[in-house]
Each structure stands twice: as structure tokens, then as C-alpha cells.
Image (cartoon, rainbow, N blue to C red):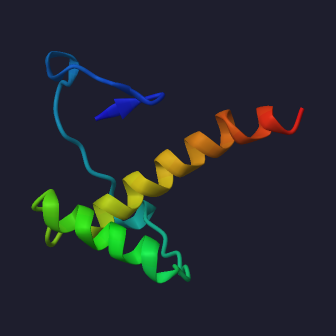
Amino acid sequence: MTLDTKVVPKRNILGKTSMARENMRTVTVLLNSDIYERIQKLIGEESLRGNQSKVMNELLGLGLHYYNTIIPKAHN
């Protein structure tokens, strides 16, 4: 688990939580084959079969964090 791209120590994690399904939204994206294959490899390596939506949520969240913290600074 990460927060602001820093690993959160396991001793600081109180427990798992999940969002209610009514708070979830569907997003459709077109991925090039390289990105798709890398995501599939990650899901397979992490034994996350059946949890693809959780992986996608995390990847999107990390991407948004990266975009909001790194990319705008490069344009200034």
C-alpha cells in the first residue's frame, strides 16, 4: 500500500475497507497492447485473478496522483 508514492508500513494499516458498489463508476478505456499486456502480467504475478477491478482502481489512482504532482510542475 502506498500514500503519496511512499510505502505505508504494515503496522500502520488498521484494516481493509471496500467501497460500496453504489459509489463505483464504470470507465471504458482503449489501451495499447503493451500497456494491456503489462497490466495482465502484473495481475498474474501478484496472484490477483478475480481482483482486476481493484488493480485497475489502484493503477488509475496512482496515475492520477502522478499526473497531479509531477506533470503540472514540468509545465511551469
Identify the residue at image location x=44%, y=75%.
34
**Quadrant containing the C terminus in the rendered view:** top right
Q: Is residue 47 left or right of residue 30?
A: left
Q: Nearer the viewer, residue 57 or 69?
A: 69
Q: Nearer the viewer, residue 14 or 3?
A: 3
Identify the residue at image location x=34%, y=76%.
37
Q: Would you say residue 34 is visible in this rendering?
A: yes
Q: Would you say residue 51 is visible in this rendering?
A: no
The x, y position of residue 56, in whole percent, is 38, 63
Residue extending farthest right: 76
Does 52 appear above or below 71?
A: below
Instruction: Give the number of marks.
Output: 0
Residue extending farthest front: 34
Identify the residue at image location x=49%, y=70%.
25
The x, y position of residue 10, in whole percent, is 16, 23
**Quadrant containing the N terminus in the rendered view:** top left
The x, y position of residue 38, in whole percent, is 35, 68
Quadrant in the picture for residue 67: top right
Identify the residue at image location x=14%, y=70%.
49
The x, y position of residue 18, in whole percent, is 26, 50
Does 17 appear above or below 73?
A: below
